[in-house]
Amino acid sequence: AIASSVAHDSHNIIAVGVNDQDIVNAVNCLIQPKGGISLCNGEKEMVLGLPVGGLMTTNDGYETANLYDQMDQEAKKLGSNLGAPYMTLSFLALLVIPKLKLSDKGLF
């Protein structure tokens, strides 16, 4: 499962996965760092904390980019065939897009 607090425009936490426990774990991983992106698969938990409004980090840019690349690759190993799983997830919550969208009110 992957989760993110980068979810345009509301920036609520959004998550996708194939089993409830991994989804819950991915969401819970974002509580301590006060936002970010996460990946949980029952064996592995990865978190890139984004404590500044759930959108930005205060960490070094190179370290952040390296961790993001690792998490992107791990998300693809979980079965995602998307070019950018976390970017796609963040725009799934953007309600003005013309196709499939997801909000706290449900699937549209």
Image (spheres, grey):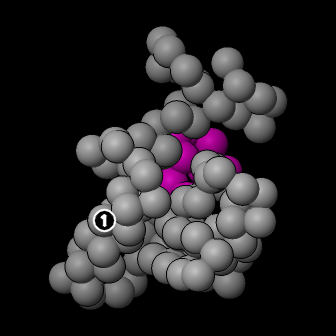
The correct choice, above or below, for 87 with respect to 3 in the image is above
Q: Secondary structure at mark 1?
A: helix
The picture quadrant where one finds residue 57 is: bottom left
The residue drawn where x is 58% and y is 71% is: 40
Q: Is residue 43 visible?
A: yes
Q: Which region shows up in magenta? A: 4-12
Q: Position of residue 87 (x, y in %)?
A: 38, 47
The picture quadrant where one finds residue 74 is: bottom left
The residue drawn where x is 77% and y is 57% is: 20
The residue drawn where x is 19% and y is 82% is: 62
Which residue is outermost to the left?
62
Q: Position of residue 78 (x, y in %)?
A: 46, 60
Which residue is outermost to the top?
98
* Amino acid marked by disc 1: Gln
Along the viewing direction, whichever of 70 and 81 lies nearer the viewer: 81
Q: Is residue 68 visible?
A: no
The correct choice, above or below, for 70 with respect to 58 in the image is above
Image quadrant holding the C terminus, namely top right
Magenta-drawn stretch contains 63? no
Q: Position of residue 4 (x, y in %)?
A: 55, 58
Along the viewing direction, whichever of 53 and 62 lies nearer the viewer: 62
The residue drawn where x is 27% and y is 44% is: 83
Label 1 CA crowd tier, 10 Å (few <14, some 14–19, many 20+) = some
Magenta-drawn stretch contains 10? yes
Image quadrant holding the N terminus, namely bottom right
Q: Is most of the magenta stretch helix, strand or loop? A: loop
| Residue at which label 1 appears | 73
The correct choice, above or below, for 37 with respect to 107 in the image is below
